[in-house]
Image: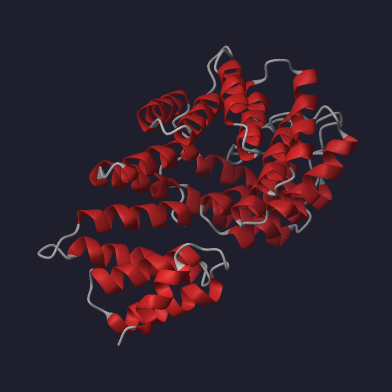
Amino acid sequence: MRVGILVLCLASQALGCTGRQGASESPKPTRGDPHAVSAMLKAVQASSESEGRKRAVTLLEQAVKLDPDLWEAHFNLGILATEAGEYEKALHHLEKSHAAAPNAEDIVVALAHVHERMGNPKLAVTVLEPYVKRFPDAIAARTVLIASLRVSAKLNEARIHAREVLIRHPGDPQALAELALTHLAGGEADLAALIVQEALKAEPPSAVAERTAGLVALHQGDDALAFKHFERAGELDPDDILARLNMATVLLKAGVYEASAKHFSAVLQRYPKETSAMLGLAAALRGQGSRDKKEPYVRAEKLLLAILELEPTHVAAHHNLALLYANFLENKPGAKRHYQLFLKHAPKGHPGRSRAKELLALP
């Protein structure tokens, strides 16, 4: 779930906050430096123009420089930085915004999403749990908390929060979808399938329910049905990046490399530093290469190196780069170097460890 871009909490502006404030009052618009507020309003206008996002960022940065307490501008900078994959920057601005407007549900949800994207679901939990305790009717925050708890392996707590949402909103498709995924994570695939069928009955139809049904179908080994659900999720919500990633992954698994690459590329157009899409595109490109067609291998190499610039300890990137060098680009020193880095960072139970050790033992 994503938070909308440039959601400014200004009472007189059309782009107001979504109003999801739990049981709290809406945060008051800052009465800050008039020049800072003016720059922020210009950023709203710039964001609606073609290629205007860069100018919007510049204007918002001017606004917070003029008035460091202008929390609305910090919030919007955090959202734009999140979409650009600049998570440290996003975290900085969203934390400032949250500190100034602790009751705003949009802000706490956006902050939790950044923690998740940085691979820290437990930090997302620490942000969301006290908020939901203060505002029990904060459905959006509680729904994100369910997902964060699930990823943190706190399945019982995730189920409790899902039921809290369903008590308040019976049949809520997002809560049902999260509950289904929680049961799936706990090895209860049949129960997950039953729950997701209830989510699919929602009106209007839910992209999240369709995406979750696809994940359940994948778990059950029905790739064709999974793809149909992911495709339907994409139709219902063209901005559902997870559905597109899932479609691309199914196509990659089936060996339909060109179509898979198109979906991964579409994600990267929106989120240029989304490492899962970069990793998937590299695999799709590798599938398109051959002895006489090395260019896809070179493009895959660039993508994997770009991932390692962003995340130097990325286990899958080191492993895939080592495979690429060993099997396709005839770069034995590069393969050995990345197998060594893979073994340094991979968990003890990783299935690729034994093969990496065998290859490193070769002359």
Drawn side of residue 171 relative to residue 309, left or right: right
Quadrant where the image shows the C terminus: bottom left
Drawn side of residue 156 relative to residue 299, left or right: right
Q: Which residue is drawn at 61% across and 57% down?
A: 118
Which residue is most to the bottom? 363
Image: 292 above or below 280:
below
Q: Which residue is drawn at 40% across and 56% down?
A: 278
Pick the front one: 362 or 86: 362
Q: Residue 2 appears in which quarter of the rendering? A: top right
Image: 47 above or below 119:
above
Image: 203 above or below 285:
above
Pick the front one: 115 or 108: 115
Quadrant where the image shows the N terminus: top right
Which residue is most to the left? 292
Q: Which residue is drawn at 57% across and 46% down?
A: 43
Position in image of residue 84 (x %, y %): 51, 54
Drawn side of residue 234 relative to residue 333, left or right: right
Position in image of residue 51 (x %, y %): 41, 47
Pick the front one: 207 or 24: 207
Pick the front one: 297 or 95: 297
Q: Can residue 20 be seen in this snapshot?
A: no
Position in image of residue 303 (x %, y %): 36, 63
Position in image of residue 350 (x %, y %): 52, 63
Which residue is most to the right? 134
Q: Which residue is drawn at 67% across and 40% down?
A: 147
Q: Can residue 46 be seen in this snapshot?
A: yes
Drawn side of residue 69 relative to residue 38, left or right: right
